[in-house]
Amino acid sequence: MRSALILVLAVVYGLLAVVVFGMSGAFTRFGAMLWKDLAVLLLTAVAACALTYVSLLLMTFLREIRAPRTTPGEPDAFRWHLLVPCRDEENVIAETVSAARTSFPGAHVWVIDDASEDGTATVIRDLMVFDPKVHLISRVAPEARTGKGDALNAAYRIVSRHAGGSPEDRHRTIVGVLDADGFLSDNTLSLLAGPESFGDDEIGAVQLEVWMKNRGDRRPRPEDGRLANLVGRVLVRMQDLEFRTTNSAMQVLRVRTGTVGMGGNGQFTRLTVLDTLAEEHGRPWGKKLCEDYELGLNILAMGMRNHYVREAHVSQEALPYTRRLIRQRTRWAQGNMECASALPTLRRSRELSASGLLEIHYFMLQPLVMMLNLVLVPLLLAVGVAQGGADFWRSTDLVLVICAALFFLVLPYAVWGLVYRRVSEGEVSVPGAICLGLLNLVYVYLTYVYYARAAWRAVTGRTGWAKTQRNADGRLLEPVVLSPELQALPLILPEQMKELVEELEGRSDLGTDFVSGWAVMWPTRQSRLERAIAAEAAVPARDAIGSIKVSSAMVGAARLERAAAQLESALAGGDVEAARALVPTVTAIGRESVGVFRKEVSVRRSLESTAHTSEPQTVTESQMVPVRRR
C-alpha cells in the first residue's frame, strides 16, 4: 500500500512539474532548443523526486510521533562504556563527564585527550580523584591529531582489553561515543536496552536523536550587539529544528528501509561488532572525515542492522556564528561525499533491500541534486524573463512562477516549522513556528555554500580535519570580587563532614563517597544554572539554584550556599540582570569549593584502610597510545 502511494505521488508530482516547467512556457518554450529541453526534463525529475521524498518523510515521521514504537529495557543487563574524544576542550569537558557519570553511575567514561594544548587533561585528572570510573587516555605528538577516527580506534583497543570477557559478555558490552559537549537524556540507557534496540541481538548499532542544548539562550554571542545576537538565536534554533525534524525524519524512514546512519554524537555500538570490524578492516573507525557515517555503512555491509531512537536524545552545543557553522558543515558534506566509495561494497553485499539501496543512493546524490537546483532554477527563470521581456512581469507567467515557487520551493521546507512546534512541545508559538518554517528555506540555502566548498576541497585534494570552535573558546573568565559577607564565610565547614560521617554510621569512606559524588555533580549543576539564566527561564533557574543550595548545605559548602541564596533573592525580585551578574560568583565559588574537597578526598582516600569500591581501577591515570601514521 505504501509503495503504491509513493508511486502515485511521484507520478502526480512529475506531471505537475512537466506542466509548470515544460509546457506552460513561463520558464521556456518546450521544443525550442535541445539544451533547454534537457534542462527542463532534468529539473522536472529533480523536483518530482524531492517532493516525493519530502512527502514520504512527513508521513512516516508524523506517524512515528503519534505512535512511538520504542520501549524501555533493563540497562543492568548490559555493560556501558562512553568514549569522549577531546582536543582543547577544557571549557566543556567537565560538564559532559559530570552529566554522564551523574545520570549513569554504572557506565565507564573514557576521555581521549588528543594532544590538547589547554587544560583538558588536568580537568579529567581532577575528576578522577573523585570517581574511579572516569578514565583518561592521552595521545601524544607526533602520533596524535591524526583525526577523530584514529582517536576512537586508540580508545577501542584499551576498552577492549579492559572489558575482556566471553563472546557473550562482549556482545552485551556497548560502546557509546559522545562529543565533548554532549549530554545524554536520562532515559538513554533504558531505551537503548529495549527490545527494538540492543535487546534485539541483530542490532549492531543505535543512533540517538540530537538536540541543541543552548536553543533557549537569549545571548548566544555575549560579546556582540543585539543584531548579532538575533542572528545567533535564529541560527541556534534552526539547527535544533534541523536535527529534530528533517534529520530525525530521515532516520525514522531509514529504520524502515534498513539504512539508519550513525552520527558522531550519540552513537552506540556493540563491542563484538567493533571487534569484527577491527578484524576485517584493521580498525573499527575509518579515515574518512565522516568516520561515524562510514562506521554505520560498514556495519550494514557485514549484515547487522542499525537502529534509531527518537525518544532519547543527546544534546550538543549549536553554533551561533555563520562562519563556524559553514566550516563545520563543509567538513560533514565532504565526509559524506567520501563515503560514496562504500556504495559498491553495499551493493555487492546484498544485505540491503531494494528500498534501502534506493534511499542510500538518493541520500548520496543529494549534493549533486542541490548543485543542479542551484544552476538550473536561476538559469531557466532568466530564460523565461528574457523571452517575456517587460510583459513577463504583467502576464500570467509571473503568477505561475510565484505559485510554482510556493509549491516546489517554499512549502517543502516551510512545513517543518509547524512540525518543529509539535516535537518541541510548544517551545515556539504558532506564528513563531511559521516564521521558522520560512526561515528554514533561507537556512537550507546555506547547504549550497558548504556543498560547493566541500566539492572544491575534494577536487583540490584537501582532506584536512579542522576542529569546530566552541562558543566559549577565546573567552576569558573575568576576576570575581566577593562581597564582604561572602568573604567572611568559610568555603567548607569541617564539622559538617564529621556530622555527615556520623549520619552514615561512622563510615568515613561513605562520607568521602558522598562528598565525591557532590563534587562530580557540580559541573552538571553549574551548567544547568548557567543555561537557565541564559534562557531567562524562571522555573528551571529556581530548580537549579535550589539544588545548589540544598546540596551545598549537606556537604558544608557554606560560602556556596550563601551565594546561591543571594542569586535566589535577585531572581525572586525579578531582577534578571542582577541574577545574571551573580552567576560568575556562584560558579567561581563552586570551583574553589570543589578544589578544597579534592585535596580532602585525596588525603582521606590515601588513609582509608578499606577499598573505595569493589571494582579495581584497571587503567593508569593516563595511557600513552602511539598510533602509527598512515
Image (cartoon, rainbow, N blue to C red):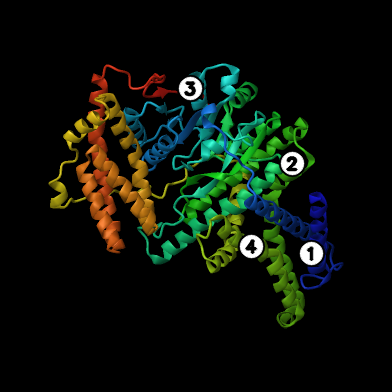
Q: Are marks 2 and 4 in contact (CB under 8 Å)?
A: no
State the image coordinates of residue 466 (x, y, percent, origin top left). Answer: 49, 42
State the image coordinates of residue 308 (x, y, percent, origin top left). Answer: 62, 41
Q: Nearer the viewer, mark 4 or mark 3?
A: 4
SS of the residue at dot 3?
Answer: helix
Residue of label 2: 356
Whole-angstrom CA distance, mark 2 to mark 3, is 35 Å
Residue of label 3: 158
SS of the residue at dot 4?
Answer: helix
- Tell me the amino acid under the disc marked 4: Val
Is 532 situated left or right of 507 in this image?
right
Q: Residue at x 75, y 30 (%)?
A: 349
State the image coordinates of residue 529 (x, y, percent, origin top left). Answer: 35, 50
- Tell me the amino acid under the disc marked 3: Ile
Residue of label 1: 17
Residue of label 4: 415
Local packing at callout 3 (Cα closer than 10 Å; few below 14, some 14-19, many 20+) is: some
Is 427 situated left or right of 475 in this image?
right
Q: Are marks 4 and 1 in contact (CB under 8 Å)?
A: no
Whole-angstrom CA distance, mark 2 to mark 4, is 26 Å
SS of the residue at dot 2?
Answer: helix
Whole-angstrom CA distance, mark 4 to mark 1, is 20 Å
Query: With respect to residue 208, does 539 lie above or below?
Result: below
* Res. 606 image quadrant: top left
Instruction: Tell me which label, 2 or 4, sits earlier in the chain.
Output: 2
Can residue 175 be seen by looking at this rendering?
yes
Whole-angstrom CA distance, mark 3 to mark 1, is 56 Å
Local packing at callout 1 (Cα closer than 10 Å; few below 14, some 14-19, many 20+) is: many
Quarter of the image that includes the C terminus = top right
Instruction: Tell me which label, 3 or 1, sits earlier in the chain.
Output: 1
